[in-house]
Amino acid sequence: MAANQSELDSFRLFPSTDDNKTQLGLSFLDDSPEKPPLPLSPPCLEVLLSEVSSSIKPTFEPVNFDGLTLLKGRVSTHEVFALSNSDLVPGKYEGGLKLWEGSLDLIKTLRLEMECGNLSLVGKKVLELGCGHGLPGIFSCLQGASCVHFQDFNSEVLQCLTIPNVVANFPVKSESLSSEVRFFAGDWSEVHQILPNLQTDDMDSNCSSGAISSFGYDIILMAETVYSISTLPALYQLIKKCMSHPHGVVYMAAKKYYFGVGGGSRRFISLVEKDDVMVASLIAEVGGGSSNVREVWKLQFK
């Protein structure tokens, strides 16, 4: 885990919790003047629970949270995408097969928020953006959320990892899954078109009118989603379109800075503050003694 990483990890782009931490896919940092055009983003689509991959079978291992144990699957980027040791390939793969530290930070923070009486997931509509393994969304199911929707850039991640993780954590014989669970793939600039129960296009996405709306999600969860500067505006606009007004809340776990690509929690929070529609509060900090501090933020409408 992050507490046991060497100081070298502080200077890596994305240290992950997976075993192979020594090689990263940095092809997108190539400074060659003749770069091939990025591939088109995959289409936005809903992936059904029944569309789980039949050819790739994850191996599962436990992740412990002080008495709560979740199962996480493990598959390789080579198995799914024919990529070797790649964390990011823009337009093709956005790191969803790895379990990043922020997902674990997010679950721990949600538990603390619940213990302090600041959060209840019972009966809530939850959206996990950039879900990957989907552990925060799975945690929300366990805590009584009425529906949990998982979103990832790649449908392959949902089929090969997210859905198997959900099934593994809710075996039919031992525990029923009472939440409505659905899975959506697509780019943040377009995926709102297929997400259910969102505001219509003629409604103000900034929610500046102050009108109470039943549309949207009560809670939006995201971990390690703010690494790329170029995607921050689309992510923020998606949040405003998806978030229920006026009582919706976003919990965001991320590194303070992502060295090499320029993104990070502070860059995203700066975008939020300039828009002046939401208020952001820092509620947790991890690894304060290192140069690669991890944070959890809470965002709400003003």
Image: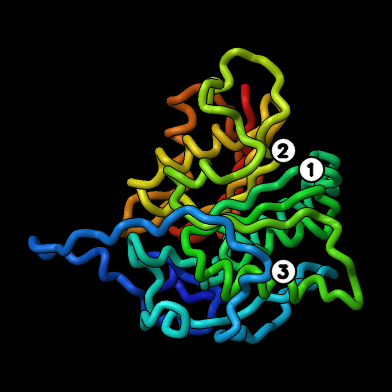
Q: Would residue 239 be found to the left or right of residue 138 on screen? A: left
Badge 1 crowding class, 10 Å Cα cut-off, few under 14, some 14 to 19, many 20 or more, is many
Task: Give how far apart the Cα atoms at labels 3 and 1 are.
Answer: 18 Å
| Label 2 crowd (10 A; few <14 / some 14-19 / many >=20) | many
Badge 2 or badge 1: first in the primary sequence: 1
For this view, does 12 lie left or right of residue 207? left
Is residue 141 left or right of 41 when viewed as pictured? right
Q: Amino acid at mark 3?
A: Val
Residue beneath the point at 37% across and 75% down: 86
The residue where tag 1 is placed is 124
* Amino acid at the residue labelled 1: Lys
- Whether residue 294 is visible: no
Disc 2 element: loop
Residue 82: % across, % down: 38, 82
CB under 8 Å between callouts 2 and 1?
A: yes
Amino acid found under the numbered disc labelled 2: Asp
Q: Residue at position x 73%, y 28% from top? A: 214
The image quadrant that residue 88 belongs to is bottom left
Sequence-first disc among 3 and 2: 3
Residue at the spot of label 3:
166
The kind of secondary structure element at disc 3 is: helix
Q: Position of residue 193 (x, y in %)?
A: 51, 41
Q: Is residue 268 above or below residue 33?
A: above
Disc 3 residue crowd, few under 14, some 14–19, many 20+, Cα 10 Å: many
Question: 93 above or below 110?
Answer: below
Q: Position of residue 279 (x, y in %)?
A: 59, 28
Contact (Cβ within 8 Å) of mark 3 with mark 2: no
Q: Which mark is residue 218?
A: 2
Single out the residue that lies furthest toward the top. 209
Q: Nearer the viewer, residue 285 or 245?
A: 245
Spatial separation of the CA atoms under disc 3 and disc 2: 21 Å
